[in-house]
Image: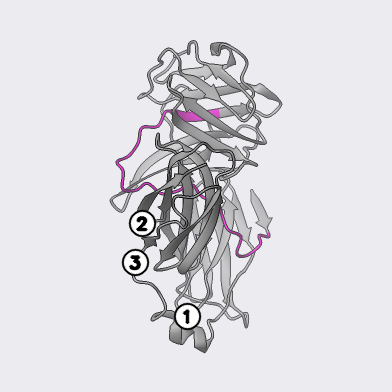
Amino acid sequence: MKRFVLLGIGVLFLLVGNVRSNPLLSFYLNELLLDLTDPLGWQLEMSEQWVLEDGQYLTTLTDTSYISSYTQSGNLPVIINDNMETPLFINPDGDILQLHDPSGSVMDEIRLGNVEQPYILAPEAGLSISFRDEVVNEEQMYYRYFDASPTLGEYNDTTDSRGTLTGFVYDQDEQPLADVQITAYFSAPFQYFSKLEAVTAEDGSYTIESLARLDSLLFHKNGYGDEIVRQQIWPNTTIEMAPVILQVLNDLEGKHDIPRTPRKYALLPNYPNPFNGSTVIGYVLPFSDMVDLSIYNVKGQKIETLFSGYQKYGRHTVAWSAGNLASGIYIYRLRTSSVILQKKCLLIK
């Protein structure tokens, strides 16, 4: 099957922040199969690390329900609505499914479809949302992908789970550009990853074969401005991408590009601090990167995301309005593709 997709160039993909400095976390939501005609007809496969404890519960954007039991006819446990204390509605067009421990902390989550910072788009009929954990170039990566042959109750595989992207890259004079690096950024619970997927040929063409992830593709070539295209890859499908056009950096930008670039990441003290109502947070990027700036309480629970997406190098500032939050200490955390930085601030009312 073949599809032709026109995508806006330079669309920024909102991504979950990077916690690469931490060891790999445990993941429990292994595979989710939705019934597109019945929001209560879902099946949720759990990983072999998962153990049911009293007080564990699932939440969506509209419902909360405690897990009372599960079924296990194969290697892995499966939960359906009959195993919940009350019905749990999962919207197949867009929802955030979270597993909570008895204290209320989030153990794992799936963000799908039309929600903030989705890990994957809304599935088509018959596609499950599966979890993948693999090592690429000595780096451990994990993400959600579509599987066209679900294996509920058994270990995930990659059969019928790969798709292909093809396209061309040109300069502003419509001349093909060779040696353009195409890096895929893809998000997962609590982190995102990047992977060099392709380099354009002499005629500007490229082909990417990948599991059916939701990627933000960064097109980069020295001397040209970067472009980003957000694209969902679909199983057993070839997508012909719209042409990507890279603009030549002008001479002035070229002369000052290197000297004006900061040498390292920096998260600056907020001002004012302490503050009453609102404060300004600044940070410095040594090169253009994926960025997530978020606010947390002292328990490590996320309060608000101030910015999440791709940003040019240099200094940036973001204002934070604390609204109705209680007085106390809060943590603002900067995450990029390679570092995580954080500082404390004090809200006084």
> Residue 54: image x %, image y %?
43, 12
What's the residue type where badge 1 is placed? Gly
Q: Amino acid at mark 2?
A: Ser
Residue 223's disc number: 1
Q: CA distance from mark 1 to mark 2?
A: 23 Å
Marks 1 and 3 close (CB-CB < 8 Å): no
Q: In the current view of this chain or complex, which residue is farthest to the right?
A: 37
Where is residue 287 drawn, in percent x and y? 42, 68
Q: Which of the marked residues, 2 or 3, is nearer the chain's N terminus? A: 3
For disc 3, the neighbor class at 10 Å (few under 14, some 14 to 19, many from 20) is few
Task: Give how far apart the Cα atoms at labels 1 and 3 are.
Answer: 21 Å
In the image, the segment drawn in magenta is: 6-32
Look at the numbered discs 2 and 3 and tell me whether their residues touch, using CB distance below 8 Å.
Answer: no
Give the numbered dot on residue 65: none
Residue farthest front in this picture: 349
Q: Main secondary structure of the magenta part?
A: loop
Report which residue position mark 3 lands on.
264
Discs 2/3, front? 3
Circle 1 Cα neighbour tier, 10 Å, few/some/many (<14 / 14–19 / ≥20): some
Residue 300 screen position, x and y as percent: 41, 37
Residue at image mark 2 = 338
Residue at the image position 52 percent from the left and 77 percent from the top: 177
Question: CA gap, disc 2 to disc 3?
Answer: 11 Å
Give the answer, above or below, for where 301 lies relative to 78.
Answer: below
Q: Is residue 192 among the parts visible in the rendering?
A: no
Q: Secondary structure at mark 3?
A: loop
